[in-house]
Image (spheres, rainbow, N blue to C red):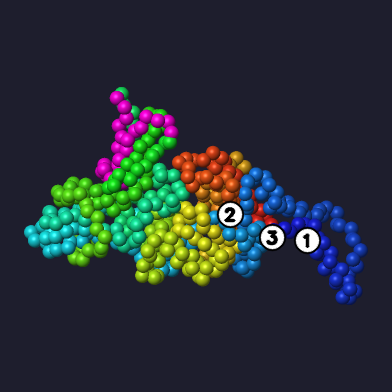
């Protein structure tokens, strides 16, 4: 239900109060209108804020719009539309995941990646295997592996008698986060306890006189080691743009020659994350004079001595990056790690999502919420805007989450970011094709703090997207731009209606 307050309603209420006072007793002064002193003019009434329905109509969005806005000082719901309706939260889910991870792991938690020797070291030679053991670190990159290789050399290691192995079993393995996404989108990679470069490989092409030069590498700030765990072939076709096949021990891609142009680059998802990390570590180890054979994957955690350990940044820094860049893999890894800490295990990503759902209902008060993952990539998740806004308004959650949210840029009349806009908004965005969400906090010039959640969803336009190979379906970008325009208009309406 949408509540609106108008000047007419205010005046009628004031007249009613005046009439009631007349029945209570004789007024102390005459109610007859008096002449104004010369030169005194009436105060100009502030402009009436637009009605919410008018803003929604102007947005021309097919589908459904739902929202709720809450006064954080009183907890009162100021305005709601479809407030109890479950809607896809998209990446707004990550704000819940951040709170879930902080609750289970604590602000000092760091992810650890280790190099373990299964036997003793004799004269610089490991008498056994060397195992790269993942600890679920979502931000492990090639630079970090290079540092670990340098530390291994500094420890005096020159070789080994056994095998070089990788272990990613600290978390469940999933070939992708959401099965309904196109194969080639880098935001839908595999998930494992051992992950590198957000489980993405850098594909680059340059046209030459005799064809294209293609590279697949694990680039980071300092290094660009080429890899064989992901391979690309150029096909003489115009569509589809990409195809993917499981090569048994590698990802086999093809790309349409007609779509390449002169040159370009793109990040593609990795489906063999353990092998990817192992291949890259072996490459950077060779640069340190340590020769390692091709990594073998193992299913059980190794026992032995930890020779080198790499610790991630503290959890709040990782969560801040997750919310800023809306990284899906980070959300899944921190969510599953939190579930393991809470329950001792997480058999699948879906199992972990159910555990987070139960926590969100009990701890955040998100009644009716259903979460199918920790990132919001799955469109089957549902949260009602009123429940989410209430959860965000809780004092303890607000204090934990707000410092990690990035400012949401309000825009001027020309559609450009407006740094001087009077309303400060700190929120998490969420975007899928024909799904748009925004939830967080807004404070206008009056200083009245508001918690809000806004969802828009056009299910009819999403029909068929699960089987599509197109990562930019027609009409989706325009629809989402209109949804974001509506979000700002609603926030400005709330400030005008309730800010004073």
Q: Quadrant of the N terminus?
A: bottom right
Question: Is the residue under label 2 in contact with that under label 3 (CB below 8 Å)?
Answer: no
Q: Give whichever of discs 3 and 2 has the lower sequence position.
A: 3
Residue 110 point in image, percent of width and height: 34, 63
Q: Secondary structure at mark 1?
A: helix
Q: Give whichever of discs 1 and 2 has the lower sequence position.
A: 1
Q: Nearer the viewer, residue 363 or 107?
A: 363
Q: Secondary structure at mark 2?
A: strand
Q: Nearer the viewer, residue 366 or 42?
A: 366
Q: Alpha-carbon neighbours of circle 1 within 10 Å: few (<14), some, or many (≥20)?
A: few
The residue under label 2 is: 455
The residue under label 3 is: 1
> For this view, does 305 lie left or right of residue 411?
left
Residue 179 point in image, percent of width and height: 43, 51
Q: What residue sits 29% from the left and 47% below the top?
A: 248
Q: Quadrant of residue 302?
A: bottom left
Q: Give whichever of discs 3 and 1 has the lower sequence position.
A: 3
Q: What residue sits 92% from the left and 63% below the top?
A: 32
């Amino acid at each position: 239900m949408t509540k609106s307050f108008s000047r007419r309603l205010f005046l009628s209420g004031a007249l009613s109060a005046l009439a009631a006072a007349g029945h209570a007793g004789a007024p102390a002064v005459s109610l007859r209108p008096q002449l104004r002193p010369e030169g005194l003019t009436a105060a100009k009434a502030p402009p009436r804020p637009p009605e919410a329905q008018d803003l929604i109509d102007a947005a021309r969005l097919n589908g459904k719009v739902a929202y709720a806005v809450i006064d954080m000082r009183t907890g009162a719901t100021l305005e709601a539309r479809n407030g109890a309706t479950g809607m896809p939260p998209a990446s707004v889910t990550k704000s819940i995941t951040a709170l879930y991870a902080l609750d289970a792991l604590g602000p000092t938690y760091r992810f650890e990646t280790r190099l373990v020797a299964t036997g003793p070291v004799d004269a610089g030679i490991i008498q056994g295997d060397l195992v790269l053991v993942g600890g679920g670190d979502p931000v492990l990159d090639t630079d970090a592996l290079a540092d670990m290789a340098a530390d291994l050399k500094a420890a005096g290691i020159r070789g080994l008698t056994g095998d070089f192995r990788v272990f990613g079993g600290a978390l469940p393995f999933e070939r992708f986060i959401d099965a309904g996404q196109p194969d080639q989108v880098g935001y839908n990679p595999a998930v494992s306890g051992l992950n590198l470069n957000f489980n993405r490989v850098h594909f680059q092409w340059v046209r030459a006189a005799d064809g294209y030069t293609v590279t697949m590498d694990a680039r980071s700030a300092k290094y660009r080691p080429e890899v064989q765990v992901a391979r690309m072939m150029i096909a003489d076709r115009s569509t589809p743009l990409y195809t993917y096949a499981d090569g048994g021990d590698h990802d086999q891609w093809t790309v349409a020659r007609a779509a390449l142009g002169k040159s370009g680059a793109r990040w593609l998802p990795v489906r063999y994350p353990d092998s990817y990390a192992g291949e890259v570590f072996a490459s950077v180890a060779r640069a340190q004079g340590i020769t390692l054979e091709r990594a073998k994957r193992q299913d059980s955690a190794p026992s032995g001595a930890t020779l080198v350990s790499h610790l991630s940044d503290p959890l709040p820094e990782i969560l801040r990056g997750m919310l800023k860049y809306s990284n899906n893999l980070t959300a899944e890894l921190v969510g599953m790690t939190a579930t393991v800490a809470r329950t001792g295990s997480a058999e699948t990503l879906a199992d972990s999502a159910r555990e987070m759902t139960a926590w969100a209902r009990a701890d955040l008060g998100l009644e009716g919420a259903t979460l199918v993952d920790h990132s919001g990539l799955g469109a089957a998740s549902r949260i009602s805007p009123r429940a989410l806004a209430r959860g965000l308004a809780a004092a303890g959650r607000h204090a934990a989450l707000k410092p990690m949210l990035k400012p949401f840029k309000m825009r001027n009349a020309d559609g450009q970011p407006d740094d001087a806009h009077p309303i400060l908004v700190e929120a998490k965005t969420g975007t899928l094709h024909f799904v748009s969400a925004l939830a967080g906090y807004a404070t206008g010039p009056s200083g009245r703090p508001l918690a809000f959640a806004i969802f828009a969803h056009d299910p009819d336009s999403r029909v068929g997207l699960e089987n599509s190979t197109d990562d930019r379906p027609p009409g989706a970008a325009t629809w989402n731009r209109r949804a974001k325009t509506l979000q700002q208009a609603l926030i400005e309406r709330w400030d005008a209606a309730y800010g004073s």
